Image: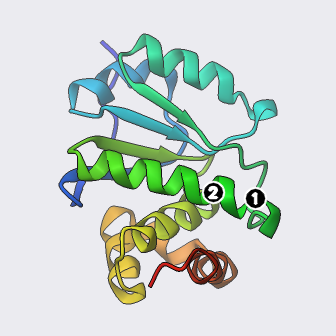
Amino acid sequence: MAPVSTVDFVAVGGGMLAVTHRPKVKSLPAMRSLGATHLVTLLSRREGAWAMGSAARAAGLEWIWVDLANADPPPPGRYGEMARALLDIASLLREGAAVVIHCSAGIHRTGMFTYALLRAMRFTSSDARLTLARLRARTADDVGDERLTWAEHLCVTMGWP
């Protein structure tokens, strides 16, 4: 059996949330056995996003792909797409899903997207930062202020308090 994934779930909105670096394909069944229901991949096609999706589905996970090519915040032209993805995942969490979010290193894209998710779920900025730190200290420490600022701008644009 593959080594157990090192995801640490935190209760969020009625469900469970975890963030991590890119999981090894052989660890996905173990992740599922730990209770994960959904894997959110923030990789580009060139980084093997489709292969991760196939492996996630084979392991019994629902797969959600948000194509983020790098650590740069998405431009305003993608705000609608980002908001839909965030609200869909927020809904899954409210319904009790156990969601794991990852990019490559689990720091920049993962931190930016997860912080935006928490804000979309109406967490205050300070509670979102604290929750991000509970999810993964390395992510919270190294996400970068410009990515958190992007998330705040998205929230204002979408009318989220």
Dot 2 alpha-carbon crowd within 10 angstroms: few under 14, some 14 to 19, many 20 or more: some
Where 8 sits versus 80, above or below?
Answer: above
Which image quarter: residue 133?
A: bottom left
Q: Marks 2 and 1: CB-CB under 8 Å?
A: yes
Disc on res. 78: 1
Q: Position of residue 17 (x, y in %)?
A: 31, 52
> x and y percent of residue 126 in the render?
37, 88
Identified by mark 1, the residue type is Arg
Q: Residue at x 44, y 69 (%)?
A: 120
Within 10 Å of the Cα at label 1, are there few (<14), some (14-19), or many (20+) other Cα atoms? few
Q: Which residue is most to the front?
A: 159
Q: CA distance from mark 2 to mark 1?
A: 6 Å
**Residue in the picture at 65% in, 75% down:** 147
At a point 58% along the width and 25% down the height, the residue shown is 52
In the displayed orientation, state which residue is furthest to the bottom. Answer: 126
Count of numbered labels shown in the rendering? 2
Report which residue position mark 2 lands on. 82
Quarter placement of the C terminus: bottom left
Question: Residue 128: image x %, image y %?
Answer: 38, 77
